[in-house]
Image: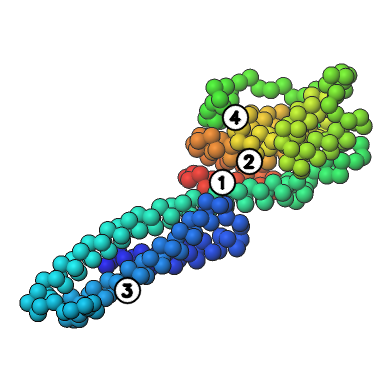
């Protein structure tokens, strides 16, 4: 009985929690099936409780079950009822054990579904706000509108508050797919203009970096991530010395991250942070590097990297610093 009461007490809250999720975010098919199974289990438990109450009345209050046909001899009624009730109790206990296990499994699956939905909603909201220009701080006008002449590239040497990771910090990040993150520092792009070969710009439209950047972003907004990857890669080869290069490097990392190619994403975000330290997207690159390391299972390295976001970029947008703290909490950082 205690297990039955516990299961009956847990199931309504479980159904209410599932209902909240279904209102805020559409549940995956597996989660919807889990909710349906839970409701069915709840109905079965109610029926079992009624049966058990009937059994208790018969045992403790002297009640007699309905009789079909001729009544049994008075001397045999007690033994027959006792055997029948004992068998029925055994059946109820077995069913209760089975349903308790199913309830626990459904609770676990719902918790997993809720966590995945929360992660997806948070990451999607952050990415959408960034695309709309509300989560990435002040950006050059060309990065927002894709029109106008690009601003001159600021020096990629870090400012006093925007410094690359020290050798010890880089060593703590660990390895990414067998390639140590303490590899030689990437050389910042030269500020001198360079000639563009026809092979470099073969896949980009004419019109300069602004048009090429809008072209690459159009694939990203459409969800065509392989094409976006190719376009941003070509953009960086052709226009790596423009003010849009840091943005392009960040979005290149996003094309990998959204496809769960975390090792490539981590390399891209690390490059965006180190090579384009003065870019408006540098704080975002460091943030996503930490998130990607967590996805790779390198929790300690992720915690160290996420802790660097507010220290290295104290003037970063509040949304970026808040997201870093949120991800630290999610990763269990101390």
**Could you tell me which secondary element the residue under label 1 belongs to?**
helix
Q: Position of residue 151 (x, y in %)?
A: 87, 36
- Binning the other alpha carbons within 10 Å of mark 2 as few (below 14), some (14 to 19) or many (20 upward) gives many
**Could you tell me which secondary element the residue under label 4 belongs to?**
helix
| The N terminus - image quarter | bottom left
Residues at marks 2 and 4, CA–CA distance in whole angstroms: 15 Å
The answer to whether mark 2 and mark 1 are in CB contact below 8 A is yes
Sooner in the amino-acid sequence: mark 2 or mark 4: 4
> Residue visible at 86% across and 44% down?
145
Residues at marks 2 and 1, CA–CA distance in whole angstroms: 9 Å
Q: Name the residue tied to disc 2.
A: 287
- Of residues 67 and 241, the one nearer the viewer is 67
Single out the mark in the foreground, 1 or 4. Answer: 4
The answer to whether mark 3 and mark 1 are in CB contact below 8 A is no
Compared to residue 227, the image places residue 188 above or below, namely above
Q: Name the residue tied to disc 3.
A: 50
The answer to whether mark 2 and mark 4 are in CB contact below 8 A is no
- Binning the other alpha carbons within 10 Å of mark 4 as few (below 14), some (14 to 19) or many (20 upward) gives many
Sooner in the amino-acid sequence: mark 2 or mark 1: 2
**Could you tell me which secondary element the residue under label 2 belongs to?**
helix
Q: Name the residue tied to disc 1.
A: 327
Residues at marks 1 and 4, CA–CA distance in whole angstroms: 19 Å
Q: Position of residue 155 (x, y in %)?
A: 79, 30
Q: Name the residue tied to disc 4.
A: 263
- Binning the other alpha carbons within 10 Å of mark 3 as few (below 14), some (14 to 19) or many (20 upward) gives few
The residue positioned farthest toward the front in the image shown = 69
Disc assigned to residue 282: none
């Amino acid at each position: 009985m205690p297990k039955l009461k516990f299961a009956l007490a847990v199931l309504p809250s479980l159904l209410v929690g599932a209902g909240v999720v279904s209102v805020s975010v559409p549940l995956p098919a597996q989660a919807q099936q889990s909710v349906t199974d839970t409701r069915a289990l709840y109905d079965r438990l109610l029926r079992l409780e009624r049966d058990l109450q009937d059994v208790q009345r018969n045992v403790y209050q002297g009640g007699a079950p309905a009789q079909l046909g001729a009544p049994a001899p008075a001397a045999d009624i007690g033994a027959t009822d006792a055997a029948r009730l004992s068998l029925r109790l055994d059946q109820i206990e077995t069913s209760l054990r089975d349903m308790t296990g199913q309830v626990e499994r459904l609770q676990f699956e719902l918790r997993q579904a809720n966590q995945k939905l929360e992660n997806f909603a948070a990451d999607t909201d952050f990415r959408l706000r960034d695309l709309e220009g509300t989560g990435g701080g002040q950006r050059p006008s060309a990065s927002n509108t894709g029109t106008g002449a690009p601003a001159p590239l600021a020096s990629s040497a870090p400012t006093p508050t925007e410094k690359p990771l020290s050798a010890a910090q880089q060593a703590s990040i660990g390895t990414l797919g067998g390639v140590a993150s303490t590899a030689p520092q990437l050389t910042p792009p030269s500020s001198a203009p360079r000639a563009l070969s026809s092979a470099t710009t073969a896949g980009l439209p004419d019109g300069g970096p602004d048009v090429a950047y809008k072209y690459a972003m159009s694939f990203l907004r459409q969800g065509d991530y392989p094409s976006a990857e190719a376009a941003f890669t070509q953009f960086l080869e052709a226009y790596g010395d423009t003010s849009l290069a840091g943005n392009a490097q960040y979005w290149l990392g996003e094309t990998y991250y959204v496809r769960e190619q975390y090792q490539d994403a981590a390399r891209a975000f690390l490059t965006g942070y180190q090579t384009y330290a003065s870019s408006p997207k540098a704080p975002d690159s460091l943030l996503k590097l930490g998130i990607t390391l967590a996805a790779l299972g390198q929790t300690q390295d992720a915690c160290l990297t996420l802790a660097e976001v507010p220290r290295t970029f104290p003037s970063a947008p509040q949304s970026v610093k808040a997201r870093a703290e949120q991800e630290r909490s999610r990763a269990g950082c101390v």
